Image: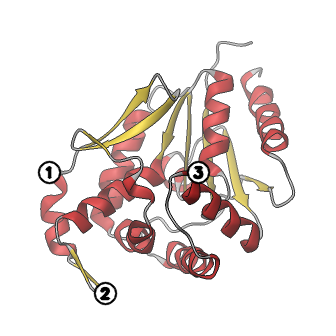
Amino acid sequence: MSSRKITIAVDGYSACGKSTLARALATQLNYNYVDTGAMYRAITLYAIRNGLINGKDLDVESLNEQLDDIDIQFEFNEASKSSMILLNDENVESQIRQMDVNDWVSQVSAVPEVRRKMVTLQQKMGKEKGIAMDGRDIGTTVFPDAELKLFMTAEIGVRTNRRIAEMKAKNIPGDFEQVKTNLLQRDKEDMSRKESPLRKADNAIILDNTNLTRDEQLNFALSKALELISK
């Protein structure tokens, strides 16, 4: 295999398997993997824990004032062979998947100062290439020059069942209609925000995985990556 390294940007809607695919690609190519969604979830968890979310309101001013107090890092877990996200040195990988975080992450992600902080950090992580990163604005804002851009989508019923399965795996209860409503609402909020909205990059490859297995998705994406690496 060529020693040339590329940047892989995986964007798309919630519960489309972006993280699963990006992580698998990173493993196959011996690349670094970054789950940017987990980063925004960690900030949302911080806001909830620190009383910055009260009822239907997010205290944006206080959140912005406390951004410098929020430290987010990834740590590789040898036992699980995966990266765990740390919020101020605490492993919060499980806590960030709770429904209260799901309900607020889009609003927190839409705060311009939050996005700028995260984009700067993400760009530093991918400065040397050899990275697979997933999110909603990776191919459009974080790495507009990424060699491989994938935009993932799937039917809403499939996405809902996938999110419920993910939650059950972490012992988190999930009601189908509640989860479905949450996903659709998040799509709407992500696409309508002013700062780095969710959209397909002009040169991104659409990957509709409604009827694809994980192996089929990986084989497709890996073939695209290897074509670029071998150039």
Relative to 88, is 85 on the left or the right? right
Residue at x 32% of width, y 67% of height: 112
Helix, strand or loop status at disc 3: helix
Marks 1 and 2 in Cβ contact (< 8 Å)? no
Toward the bottom, the furthest residue is 56
Q: Quadrant of the N terminus?
A: top right
Q: CA distance from mark 3 to mark 2?
A: 31 Å
Viewer-side residue, 116 vs 213? 213
Q: Position of residue 85 (x, y in %)?
A: 38, 41
Q: Amino acid at mark 3?
A: Gly
Label annotation for residue 28: none
Which residue position is annotated with label 1?
69
Q: Position of residue 68 (x, y in %)?
A: 15, 51
Viewer-side residue, 45 vs 111? 45
Relative to 57, is 214 on the left or the right? right
Q: Quadrant of the C terminus?
A: top right
Viewer-side residue, 181 vs 106? 181
Mark nearer the N terminus (3 vs 2): 2
Label 1 or label 3, whichever lies nearer to me, is: 1
Helix, strand or loop status at disc 1: helix
Q: Amino acid at mark 2?
A: Lys
Mark nearer the N terminus (1 vs 3): 1
Which residue position is annotated with label 2?
56
Q: Amino acid at mark 1?
A: Asp
Label annotation for residue 139: 3
Label 3 or label 2, whichever lies nearer to me, is: 2
Q: Dot 3 surroundings within 10 Å: few (below 14), some, or many (20 or more)? A: many
Mark nearer the N terminus (1 vs 2): 2
